[in-house]
Image: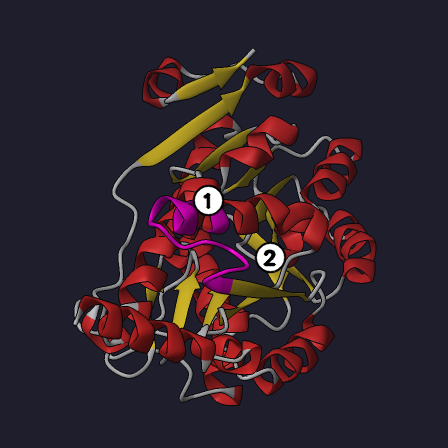
Amino acid sequence: MNNRRKLLIALGAASLTPRTLLAQVKPPILIGWLSFTSRESGARWLDALKEGLAALGWKEGAQVRIDARWADGRDDRVASITQELSAQKPGLIVAQGLRTAISAAKAAPKIPMVMVTNNDPVAAGLVTSLARPGGMITGLAGFAVELIGKHLELLLAVAPKVKRVGFLAPLTAPNRAELLEVARRSATRYAVEAHFAEAGNPEDIEPSMSRLAKEGAQGLVVMPGGLFAIERRRIVRLASTQRWPVIAGPRSWAEEGALLSYGATDDQVASHRRAAYFVDRILKGAKPGDIPIEQPTTFEFIVNLRTAKVLGLMMPPEIMVRATRVIE
């Protein structure tokens, strides 16, 4: 009997041709990566996603394959790269930024999506609620719009002589109207003049900044936007030529020379690594709409004393007490 069993096993193995064996090997799941930023500025975030997936046991190349598309901070590229990616029929899309998430939801409504954004997806109409998103979308979201009033408050606390404030706004942001309305209300509350300049592509930055200068702006609030994140070094440099105190959200702004930054703890690397958790859940069978969207729970306020010295500003003690980090 033992010999007969061995013979049957041997005959069975022999019947498995190379083509049959290959057919039994599952191809890796295609994950689409869709980012408004450039490869240069966003590569570390994609690497963080890959690291998160690896930590959860997903082997790149063998079990998953990632197709990355980048808009390079250009509004006019978002639709085309979304269509290119959806044509590949990925099993799941990771969308970095609200704009790309909205584009992916329109182009590929049946493909599960994990988004990583600083904005409110409920207000944008992407999901029903944070606790129960519904549909095919989940991920991480933030409070970028709500922080604009706080940015103006902090800027004026440090530079009380500023009476005309420039707001650099994203021209085609999905939540553009909300951003502008919050900024106007905040300016009224603090009795300052609000001057707005918008930019949708990199070549718009310098003309927009020049317009604010001609209108007599004395300080600058940079609204949230992927383009501005890419161009932050140039924006800070242009503002410095006008001797404007600048405030924005992520800590990278203060590190580049802005006077202040205030926002959710700016660990985009950690956020994108966390996105792997959502990808893992979906690939294992969970419905995206049943997975609650996560929001940040910690915030940081960074003061750049080097910039303050250049601008001739003295930091009030109450500001220094509130700072979670000081750049000297």
Is 33 drawn above or below residue 205 in the view shown? below
Looking at the image, residue 269 sits to the left or right of residue 212; the answer is left
Q: Residue 299 at x, y = what percent?
A: 33, 36
State the SS at label 1.
Answer: helix
Residue underneath mark 1: 51
What is the distance, in whole Å, between disc 2 and disc 1 at their CAs?
A: 23 Å
Q: Which mark is first along the chain, 1 or 2?
A: 1
Residue topped by disc 2: 226
- Placement of the N terminus among the 4 image quadrants: bottom left
**Residue 278 in the image: above or below residue 18:** above
Q: Position of residue 201 (x, y in %)?
A: 75, 64
Front residue of this view, candidates 94 and 254: 94
Q: Residue at x 24, y 76 (%)?
A: 287
Residue sitting at 30 percent across and 47 percent down? Answer: 296
Q: Amino acid at mark 1?
A: Glu
Tell me whether circle 2 and circle 1 mark residues in contact (CB < 8 Å).
no
Q: Does the magenta-highlighted stretch encompass residue 61?
A: yes
